[in-house]
Amino acid sequence: MAKDICLQLGCTAPIFAFSHCRDVVVEASRSGGFGVLGAVLFSPEQLEQELRWIDEHVGDHFYGVDVLIPVTYSKEAETSTGRLREIVPPSHLEFVEKLLGDAGIPPLPPDVQRQVDEDRRGAERNNTPAGARALVEVALRHPKMKLLVSALGSPPPDVVEAMHARGGLVGALCGKAEHARRHAQAGVDVVIAQGTEAGGHTGAISTFVLVPQVVQACAPDVAVLAAGGITRGSQVAAAIAMGAQGVWCGTLWLATRESDLLSYQKQALFKARAEDAVQSLSRTGKPVRLLRSRWSEAWEAPGAPQPLPPPLQEVLVRMAVPRIDRAEREDFYTTPCGQGVADLHEELSVRQVMVELQEGYLEALDRLAAVRAQLAAET
Ligand SMILES: Cc1cc2nc3c(=O)[nH]c(=O)nc-3n(C[C@H](O)[C@H](O)[C@H](O)COP(=O)(O)O)c2cc1C
């Protein structure tokens, strides 16, 4: 039987905040929830620095780390890390150059470009199975890191064992009940049932359908968190009603005060509607729910090349994004984001968002209590 997740992780509210930004992670844990740092963008050295900073600022609270451990990876790509650009078809490179050039998005100055190329080569090394292992090793060295999450597929047995040996928990995301069963068999303690509404790599099943199925597949032995489209306290109540122990949110923190997104990026998110969060291959070559923009639309236009399989499409994204950011081109801004983006309207602090979620949750419970009282009075 899964123990209460808050008791195990030392938080007061079962609200998990996924973010690539350390300030969001710290503030989420300090506000009673549980912050989880997405490690995919960091080299092992950078992750070490980020976690040291989190350790210093998080006080007596705990946090998690999410690592994308690729289950399948192209051998050609693995032997070409740092040189992936060389195996990208020239026609794709030309397509991106023309797209940005025609839109008046200038190339970067040579010194900035050199730094970007160096960062890109570093990121390529981290996204291989061996690179992910190196990130896990860094994470395991930090005692306040209490939850290690595998973003893709079940975590390897030795990782589960190492985390359990140090008294921590292991989590994994799933988009189908059968994935959840596999995670449970692999010894995972927390399954994050992520519906199609979510930002990031998503499947086809909605949160409202998926969560009860995952709960049925692996609770009570495994704790289930509901993810995908959750921005309100009433949805937290719905998740608990469906048998989840809590919620896991990503989009909700993107435009918070602590988030390191640029101002033009936050503005783009405030304007977005639910239908602007579309599934697209334009980011990683796999279906990612992201903000529709001229970048995603260009890959769907007639005559556009087919997006490349992982990890090559990301090489193109890493070429384009620094140029788009430098030009602050909202119309080309590309980021994973879920349908809940429609509920982001202003720059609130992480603490304010946490408070609003909890107030909304309590209001929902009051509504349910009133329904229950009325039913009792009628019978
Ligand atoms: C910008 C962004 C980046 C994401 N990157 C990752 C990632 O690297 N690893 C991961 O496990 N999930 C990632 N996700 C998915 C989140 O973990 C989470 O499941 C999802 O955001 C929940 O749905 P929501 O966006 O509707 O809140 C990302 C989500 C967003 C919005």
Image (cartoon, rainbow, N blue to C red):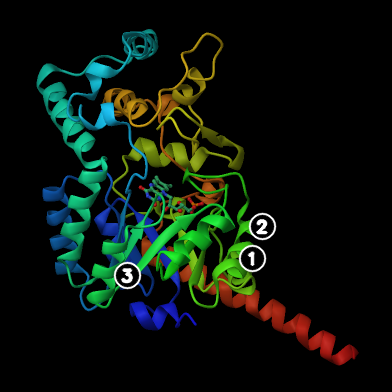
* Label 1 or label 3, whichever comes before in sequence order: 3
Considering the numbered disc 3 on the image, is that residue within a helix, a strand or a loop? helix
Direction from residue 313 to residue 162 in the image, left or right: left
Image location (x, y in percent) of residue 192: 48, 61
Image location (x, y in percent) of residue 83: 18, 24
Q: Amino acid at mark 2?
A: Val
Q: Amino acid at mark 1?
A: Pro
Seen from the viewer's position, the closer of residues 300 and 159 is: 159
Label 1 neighbourhood size at 10 Å, few (<14), some (14-19), many (20+)? many
**Mark 3 vs mark 2, CA separation in Å:** 29 Å
State yes or no: Cβ of the residue under disc 3 lies below 8 Å from any atom of ligand 1: no
Image location (x, y in percent) of residue 316: 32, 23
Disc 1, disc 2: CB below 8 Å? Answer: yes
Considering the numbered disc 1 on the image, is that residue within a helix, a strand or a loop? helix
**Which mark, by number, is residue 29?**
3
Question: Mark 2 highlights which residue?
Answer: 209
Question: Mark 1 highlights which residue?
Answer: 212
**Residue placed at 45% from the left, 82% from the top?**
4
